Image (cartoon, rainbow, N blue to C red):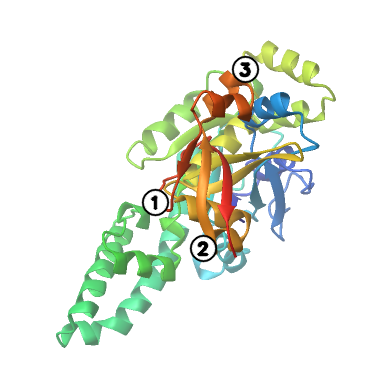
């Protein structure tokens, strides 16, 4: 399941440094705007302690974690919706992502220039919000022009679409994002998918701070929290420069010692990856055998056949049943055979909704 999170923000807020920490792909990091022009794409592993726990019990030939793609997108400036800077390219790149990680500069450093001359993360956030909203407003107004005549002539289906578009238009004109007007019907859901509005995408705000504020945050972070309190969006605090230092340490023990000195229990990038996973409304199930222990990414709410289809479309087409073991049962009884003996293996049909952490084996016939 190829899912992408786009890292966005004004120039020089730490996007490329963060991307370098997340991915083996190295984005150029420099102290001037538009350092990143082409979007850098990196495939990153989703940290999941459960995968390692299963592997410790089974000792498979290989372990395959699940992944998410992270896209480092060029910095935005005022006027991007009208093509200023790298505006059109930037907006097109965002449109191709499933969710947005919005990096905000929450550190003071005279050696790192700010494109607007001062550090104000709330202002920076609003600059990007406005540009995305203006671009969305163009798309919504264009669609309204197409359906307005049919809606006014008494076409009930067109009238419903028109009303939904007007709700979004009103919100955008009020400086709100399209995500504040979620679709309420199947037709609205379909239209939402067609429009691919930038501000309808789920967003995670990432406050990039200096070393002293990694564990506790600072006044800039608090201002961000207040500004986004009504958006139902998560706020994470991370020090991109510190994460870069952690990423260069060679051993797990060295990294843990470094984290301990900072008062942290895990790297910020691990928290970020997990948060991105939640942002995309994803969950994990596992397949486990001697050849391979593997994590699979699915959307929450997937049925057993849909989950099987992530492995191969034939699995979904020919689905017969799924044998399911709860993760905790597998860990407690230490083997599939012991789970079966304890009567903890369930056989599920096509209506079964897969739960996060299920260990599954599919029966199918093509």
Count the labels in the image: 3
Q: Which residue is mark 1?
A: 351
Question: Left or right: where does residue 186 sit relative to residue 312?
Answer: left
Circle 1 or circle 2, nearest the eye: 1
In this picture, is 226 found above or below 191? above
Q: Which residue is mark 3?
A: 265
Counting residues from the N terminus, which is met first, the one under dot 1 or under dot 2?
Answer: 2
Mark 1 and mark 2: Cα distance apart in space:
49 Å
Counting residues from the N terminus, which is met first, the one under dot 2 or under dot 3?
Answer: 2
Counting residues from the N terminus, which is met first, the one under dot 3 or under dot 1?
Answer: 3
Estimate the x, y position of residue 87 in percent, counting from the top left: 58, 64
What SS does tag 3 mark? loop
What SS does tag 1 mark? loop
Question: Dividing the image into 4 quarters, which one contains the N terminus?
Answer: bottom right
Residue at x-position 45% and y-position 54%: 201
Estimate the x, y position of residue 142 in percent, counting from the top left: 37, 78
Estimate the x, y position of residue 101 in percent, counting from the top left: 55, 45
Q: Which residue is mark 2?
A: 79
Q: Nearer the viewer, residue 60 or 99?
A: 60
Estimate the x, y position of residue 40 in percent, counting from the top left: 72, 54
Residue at x-position 53% and y-position 45%: 102
In this picture, is 118 found above or below 257? below
Residue that extends furthest to the left in the rendered view of this protein? 154
Q: Residues within 10 Å of mark 1 (few under 14, many from 20)?
A: few
Mark 3 and mark 1: Cα distance apart in space:
39 Å
Circle 3 or circle 1, nearest the eye: 1
What SS does tag 2 mark? loop
Q: Nearer the viewer, residue 331 or 277?
A: 331
Residue 246 sits in quarter:
top right
């Amino acid at each position: 399941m190829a899912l992408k999170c786009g890292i966005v923000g004004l120039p020089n807020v730490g996007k490329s440094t963060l991307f370098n920490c997340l991915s083996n792909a190295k984005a150029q990091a420099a102290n001037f705007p538009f350092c990143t022009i082409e979007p850098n794409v990196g495939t990153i592993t989703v940290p999941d302690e459960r995968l390692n726990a299963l592997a410790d019990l089974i000792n498979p030939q290989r372990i395959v974690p699940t992944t998410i793609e992270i896209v480092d997108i060029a910095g935005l400036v005022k006027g991007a919706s009208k093509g200023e800077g790298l505006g059109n390219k930037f907006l097109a790149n965002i449109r191709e992502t499933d969710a947005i990680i919005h990096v905000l500069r929450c550190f003071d450093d005279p050696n790192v220039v700010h494109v607007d001359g001062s550090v104000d993360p709330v202002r920076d956030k609003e600059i990007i919000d406005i540009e995305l909203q203006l671009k969305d407003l163009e798309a919504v107004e264009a669609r309204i022009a197409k359906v307005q005549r049919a809606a006014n002539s008494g076409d009930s289906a067109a009238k419903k679409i028109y009303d939904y578009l007007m709700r979004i238009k009103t919100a955008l004109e009020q400086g709100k994002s399209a995500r504040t007007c979620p679709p309420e019907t199947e037709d609205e859901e379909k239209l939402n998918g067609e429009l691919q509005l930038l501000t309808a995408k789920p967003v995670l705000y990432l406050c990039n701070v200096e070393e002293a504020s990694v564990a506790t945050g600072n006044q800039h972070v608090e201002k961000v929290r207040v500004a986004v309190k009504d958006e139902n969006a998560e706020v994470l605090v991370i020090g991109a420069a510190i994460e870069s230092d952690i990423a260069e340490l060679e051993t797990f023990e060295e990294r843990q010692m470094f984290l301990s000195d900072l008062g942290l229990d895990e790297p910020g990038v691990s928290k970020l990856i997990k948060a991105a996973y939640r942002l995309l409304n994803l969950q994990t199930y596992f397949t486990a055998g001697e050849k391979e222990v593997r994590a699979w990414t699915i959307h929450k709410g997937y049925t057993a056949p849909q989950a099987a289809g992530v492995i191969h479309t034939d699995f979904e087409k020919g689905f017969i049943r799924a044998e399911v073991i709860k993760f905790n049962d597998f860990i407690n009884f230490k083997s599939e055979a012991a789970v079966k003996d304890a009567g903890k293996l369930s056989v599920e049909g096509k209506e079964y909704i897969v739960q996060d952490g299920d260990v599954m084996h599919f029966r199918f016939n093509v």
